[in-house]
Amino acid sequence: MKAIVIGSGGREHAIAWKLSQSQLIDKIYCAPGNGGTALENKCENIKIYDFKKLLNFSKDNKIDFVVVGPEAPLVDGITDIFKANGIKIFGPSKQAAALEGSKAFAKDFMKKYGVKTAAYEVFHEPLSALNYLKSCSYPIVIKADGLAAGKGVSICQSPKEAADCIESFMVDDIFKGAGRRIIIEEFLEGVEASILAVTDGTTIIPLLSAKDHKTIYENNEGPNTGGMGAVTPNPFCTKEVLESFRTEIMEPTLKGIGKEDMDYVGVIFFGIMITKKGVYLLEYNVRMGDPETQAVLPLMESDFAELIINALDKNLCNYNLRWKNKYSCCVVAASGGYPNKYKIGFEVNGISNDGDKVFIAGARLEGDKLLTSGGRVLAVTSLDESLEKARIRAYNGIDKISFSDSYYRKDIGL
Ligand code: AMP
Ligand code: GLY
């Protein structure tokens, strides 16, 4: 079989790498891929960014299925276009992708189908939002409705901070349209977990839980990033937490997808908060997480291509997903300065896959050199029989890799 993986990050390298291990797969085109996918077994990078050209490529090359890494093409409706042209594609329709593309849509969906989530109000204009602030207790959470590259959520400690936030989102329009509509939400205190699940629209299979580490510095300090590391399984996801997640979040979500007649074959990423009052859904993403994917997929014993094919054939009810009985720790190395300004073009040295796996994110291949090209440059994932052992291995691995200005957190999985 031939597949295309769309995207260029560490997540997409992990997806392509895992697919390449399948006996069912002969060839994987990575559009556009990165310096890691360029060297991966069975993989070839193709510089095609446009949907229409990618569709023609898929037809010309008799592609069996397409896997979409990032959310933007899904929100823009890539699935509808490919399906209409008879190409199998793993990712939700445009209508379903609004679960990530619009937070107001997602919250209204959660409310309608009884998915446990924080209390909220939606505002379309600043005056009523400012007025509402008087009745709030603090902190409160203000969210831009649309996609804002992970920067659209602000936790406000006072009415003044909240008013400034509303001003910048709705009036100054810092997210270029994505913050003209906002959600004001109850603040939840607890620990977060990421649970990815694969669905064919009628059956949903959760993958192992993961814990992301969002801030740039240790001890959850500094600005949020795309994610600086992840561990699997998430140590806070006890049996009880997973049971609450299943009955109060995952199952009502699947029911809602059915009732709304959404065309959803792909991954649903549940961002949850585990609190003293129970388990709450913070958000849906309609794709796999980054770096969660780099921590989760190496633990999958089953054939990932087979899982995707079963989802595309709407046959997940008969599918039995198997895992390795191990722990994984994934540590990200970033360009110094990220998530703000950083320099690129530095040579990366010391990569070996001796027992660990290095997933490339922001680095490109030039000749036989790997040069940094993005904020998050790479990640090392190690597996072992305990989280502590996996952690030590991952840090040993990342210590051997070097590039100028390299930065990584020292407390992933602590
Ligand atoms: P979201 O994009 O909705 O997941 O929000 C991004 C981040 O903001 C989450 O990962 C949490 O750390 C934080 N967050 C979002 N909603 C809440 C909430 N209701 N209470 C506390 N923190 C939140
Ligand atoms: N690591 C969080 C995300 O992928 O959205």
Image: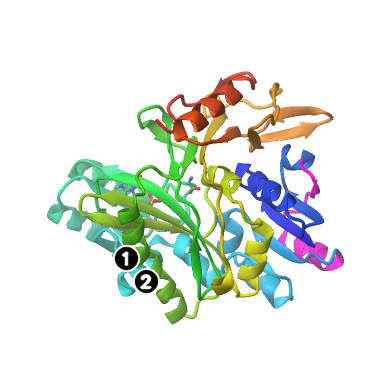
**Label 2 belongs to which residue?**
252
Q: Is mark 2 within 8 Å of ligand 1?
A: no
Q: Which of 60 and 254 is in front in this view?
A: 254
Between residue 170 and residue 359, name the one nearer to us: 359
Snapshot colouring: rainbow
Residue 331, horizontal then vertical, whole percent: 53, 32
Q: Label 1's element?
A: helix
Q: Where does the image place residue 13, in percent across and percent down from the top left?
A: 67, 44
Residue interval drawn in magenta: 40-60
Which residue is drawn at the image coordinates 61% and 69% (left, top)? 311
- Residue 372 seen in the figure: yes
Q: How far apart are marks 2 and 1 (CA)?
A: 6 Å
- Residue located 47% across and 39% down the image: 231
Q: Which residue is drawn at 70% across and 27% down?
A: 352
Q: Nearer the viewer, residue 351 or 170?
A: 351
The image shows residue 409, relative to residue 52, as above or below, that is above
Give neighbour class at mark 1: few <14, some 14-19, many 20+ (Cα, 10 Å): many
In the rendered view, does 196 fall on the left or right side of 54?
left
Q: Are marks 2 and 1 in contact (CB under 8 Å)?
A: yes
* Residue that appears at 37% across and 71% down: 252
Q: Residue 248 bears which disc, if any?
A: 1
Of residues 305 and 79, which is closer to you in this image?
305
Type of residue at label 2? Pro
Badge 2 element: helix
Specify whether residue 57 is painted magenta: yes
